[in-house]
């Protein structure tokens, strides 16, 4: 398939990339920015903390449902028109979220916001892909990667600062001026190549779309509520898990038989697309899971507030920005599969290093280990995206972008769910293991109990009460240590997965055609 640019862009493609990334950055930011504000939202709208999590779920569910449809809508409306429509819809629904006066109203507006924003990431990637010649795709996706990787990192930081210093409503209001600016810039700078202009399309595959919506919606609810509902001990989770499996299975069988499917599953027959999609799935897995774990760790075990826990994450964004263009250049020099394998190992090392933290770890160390966690992500995202689109025709760009975005989002959702489950399970195991040492036969416990008892007795408290208080103090320390050990186990779990993928990456196809293009361009 020919992946060349259909028509030379009138505007510098790097400017086009920055403009379309502005809108996509706004949308990706909203997947994580509300996380740290849930307690404030719940208190303001008179809802419980459990009910407030639907603010996140509703957005992710509707966002996941619209992604497969974005390719068809892009063809129906023209890609530029669809992109502008999505920006305007996202801007309007952001404003509505900000003025919501009840939780049901906010959840409804978040559903609409997710629907409007679902088309922004695929359109952004497709526009950038068609704006650059093949030999410069690496640098193009480096710009895309800044949006994809940086926004989830900055989301909790920005959300925490706004919530602590202003109001949670400004999390949504801030999208209004950004969205209007993005619409203006897209209008004057972006042009559609012939393959992306309004086309005569067949009627939408309503059955395929309905099955996808049913399956993905149910899956997202299972992932988001599974831990809270005690997984498959809950009939609620069992029912939705069955709906997800049946819905997605039927969707695959149905779509494969359609002449004009709502999702081009045939793209997965291209090895240079299917294997990078798998890697991008795990980019989302590692990015979102690690971005969730570290703020939880520092808030629950080290007393950090929302703003400070966000500031643990934000410096790693600087490292990401620095590395993206570097990797963008390396893509034309080094085979993508080697860069991806190296990125997997580097990210795995960062996850493993985080498990070496102790109760005495300070802020600077947390920042450094977070940088170690994320500095390898550009080596994953940029080469995987470049390789995935290297043999995609301009006509299939929008559909391919929708699949890539969906894979990344699913990776994030599944990653958060699996790692959260691993964390809670490990806390129980580590606590059980440490409790075995709370016997007088253990010299460490005996010594600590005697020391604390003497310290408390020195405050004028009777010996019996001092001994009880000392045991309580030791047990609290045990819970604290068990929690830190559980985070170590969760990070090691992610590290092991990444090491396995580093080996799998070596079996990906070469991007030889891309290297030839780069070589030809240099002569």
Image (tube, rainbow, N blue to C red):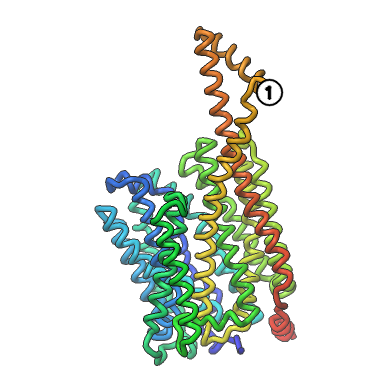
Location of the C terminus (image quadrant)? bottom right
Q: Camera-side residue: 173 or 299?
A: 299
Question: Which residue appears farthest toward the left when viewing the image?
Answer: 101
Residue 402, x across and y down, in percent: 49, 75
Q: Camera-side residue: 354 or 213?
A: 213
Q: Which residue is mark 1?
A: 442
Image height of 66 relative to 97, above or below: below
Specify whether residue 30 is in view.
no
Image height of 387 relative to 281, above or below: below
Image quarter of residue 8: bottom right
In the drawing, does residue 517 fall left or right of residue 458?
right
In the drawing, does residue 21 fall left or right of residue 515?
left
Q: Residues within 10 Å of mark 1 (few under 14, many from 20)?
A: few
Count the labels in the image: 1
Residue 521, x across and y down, in percent: 70, 84
Residue 457, x across and y down, in percent: 55, 10
Residue for point 68% across, 23% down: 442
Location of the N terminus (image quadrant)? bottom right
Residue 454, x across and y down, in percent: 59, 11
Question: Which residue appears farthest toward the bottom when viewing the image?
Answer: 200
Specify whether residue 53 is in view.
yes
Residue for point 62% across, 16% down: 451
Image height of 295 relative to 267, above or below: above
Q: Camera-side residue: 515 or 200?
A: 200
SS at circle 1: loop
Residue for point 34% across, 50% down: 51
Residue for point 64% across, 65% down: 380
Image height of 494 relative to 472, above or below: below
């Amino acid at each position: 398939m020919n992946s060349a640019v259909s028509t030379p862009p009138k505007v510098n493609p790097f400017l086009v990339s920055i403009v379309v990334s502005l809108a996509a950055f706004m949308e990706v930011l909203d997947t994580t920015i509300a996380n740290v504000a849930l307690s404030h939202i719940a208190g303001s709208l008179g809802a419980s903390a459990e009910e407030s999590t639907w603010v996140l779920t509703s957005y992710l569910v509707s966002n996941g449902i619209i992604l497969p449809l974005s390719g068809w809508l892009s063809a129906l409306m023209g890609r530029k028109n669809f992109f502008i429509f999505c920006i305007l819809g996202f801007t309007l629904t952001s404003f509505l979220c900000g003025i919501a006066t009840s939780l049901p109203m906010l959840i409804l507006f978040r559903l609409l916001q997710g629907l409007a924003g679902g088309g922004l990431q695929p359109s952004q990637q497709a526009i950038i892909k068609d704006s650059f010649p093949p030999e410069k795709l690496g640098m193009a996706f480096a710009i895309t990667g800044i949006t994809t990787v940086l926004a989830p990192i900055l989301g909790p930081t920005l959300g925490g600062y706004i919530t602590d210093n202003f109001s949670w409503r400004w999390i949504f209001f801030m999208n209004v001026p950004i969205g209007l600016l993005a619409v203006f810039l897209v209008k004057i700078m972006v042009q559609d190549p012939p393959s992306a202009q309004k086309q005569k399309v067949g009627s939408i595959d309503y059955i395929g779309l309905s099955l996808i919506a049913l399956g993905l919606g149910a899956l997202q609810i299972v992932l988001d509520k599974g831990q809270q509902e005690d997984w498959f001990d809950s009939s609620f989770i069992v029912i939705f898990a069955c709906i997800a499996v049946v819905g997605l299975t039927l969707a695959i069988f149905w779509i494969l038989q359609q002449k004009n499917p709502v999702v081009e599953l045939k793209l997965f027959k291209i090895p240079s697309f299917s294997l990078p999609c798998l890697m991008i799935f795990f980019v989302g897995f590692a990015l979102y899971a690690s971005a969730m774990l570290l703020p939880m760790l520092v808030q629950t075990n080290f007393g950090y507030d929302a703003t400070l826990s966000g500031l643990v994450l934000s410096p790693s964004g600087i490292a990401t920005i620095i590395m993206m263009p570097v990797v963008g250049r390396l893509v034309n020099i080094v085979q993508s599969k080697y860069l991806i394998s190296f990125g997997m190992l580097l990210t795995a090392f960062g996850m493993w290093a985080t498990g070496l933290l102790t109760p005495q770890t300070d802020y600077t160390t947390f920042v450094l280990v977070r940088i170690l966690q994320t500095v390898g992500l550009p080596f994953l995202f940029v080469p995987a995206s470049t390789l995935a689109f290297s043999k995609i025709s301009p006509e299939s760009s929008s559909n391919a972008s929708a699949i890539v975005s969906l894979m990344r989002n699913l990776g994030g959702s599944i990653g958060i769910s699996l790692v959260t489950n691993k964390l809670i399970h490990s806390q129980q195991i580590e606590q059980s293991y440490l409790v075995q040492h709370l016997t007088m036969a253990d010299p460490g416990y005996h010594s600590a109990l005697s020391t604390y008892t003497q310290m408390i007795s020195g405050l004028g408290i009777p010996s019996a009460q001092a001994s009880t208080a000392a045991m309580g103090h030791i047990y609290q320390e045990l819970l604290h240590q068990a929690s830190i050990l559980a985070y170590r186990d969760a990070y090691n779990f992610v590290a092991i997965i990444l090491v396995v993928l580093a080996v799998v990456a070596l079996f990906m196809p070469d991007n030889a055609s891309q290297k030839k293009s780069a070589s030809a361009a240099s002569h």
